Amino acid sequence: MEQRERVRTFRWDEMEREHVVEGIDRRIINGDQMMLTHVYLKKGAVVPLHSHHNEQFTYVLEGVLRFWIGDEGSEPIDIGPGEVLHIPSHVPHKAEALEDTLDVDVFSPPRQDWLDKTDDYFRRK
């Protein structure tokens, strides 16, 4: 297979926007070893405490996300436009949108639970 055959281009505005839960939508680009996502969070939306084996970078383009790293009693870290948070594998974390927010999440390896919609920590009521 020629290398050119494996090269792909994407346009965010042309991609399907998945509704995850009230206040949170996302778009996913998946490669062999990494995943790039746009996550759209309305003010007040919460990503519940969870962890995963995937290494994660969160880059905020618009808005502000407040993170708690470790247990729920941890000190909050606010990430705003132009800032990046690195979350190593297996580190528990929770987030809340302090404003309407657009962030770019990068995962390695890709989040299989996001691809097959088994990310129950998001979807439980």
Image: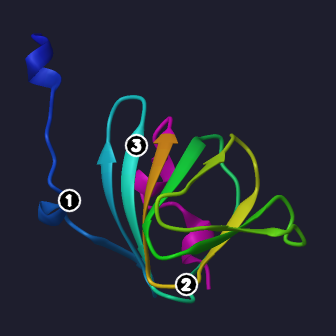
Image quarter where the C terminus lies is: bottom right
Q: CA distance from mark 2 to mark 3?
A: 22 Å
Kindly indicate the quadrant of the structure image that contains residue 122: bottom right
Going by the numbered disc 2, the residue's amino acid type is Ala
Q: In this rendering, does residue 46 appear at all?
A: yes
Image quarter where the N terminus lies is: top left
Q: Residue at x 14, y 35 (%)?
A: 8
Percent x, y for residue 79?
60, 65
Sequence-wise, which precedes: disc 1 or disc 3? 1
Q: Residue at x 20, y 66 (%)?
A: 16
Going by the numbered disc 1, the residue's amino acid type is Trp
CB under 8 Å between discs 1 and 3: no
The residue identified by callout 3 is 35
Kindly indicate the quadrant of the structure image that contains residue 38: bottom left
CB under 8 Å between discs 2 and 3: no
CB under 8 Å between discs 2 and 1: no
Q: CA distance from mark 2 to mark 1?
A: 22 Å
Q: Where are the magenta residues, as a range?
A: 108-125
Q: Is residue 39 above or below residue 54?
A: below
The residue identified by callout 1 is 12
Q: Which mark is residue 45?
A: 2
Going by the numbered disc 3, the residue's amino acid type is Met
Sequence-wise, which precedes: disc 2 or disc 1? 1
Sequence-wise, which precedes: disc 2 or disc 3? 3
Q: In this rendering, does residue 48 appear at all?
A: no
Q: Is residue 62 above or below residue 57?
A: below
Kindly indicate the quadrant of the structure image that contains residue 35: top left
Please name whichever residue, 85 or 117, is drawn nearer the observer in this view of the structure: 85
Say whether residue 96 is magenta: no
Q: How is the image coloured?
A: rainbow
Q: Is residue 44 above or below residue 56?
A: below
Percent x, y for residue 6?
16, 24
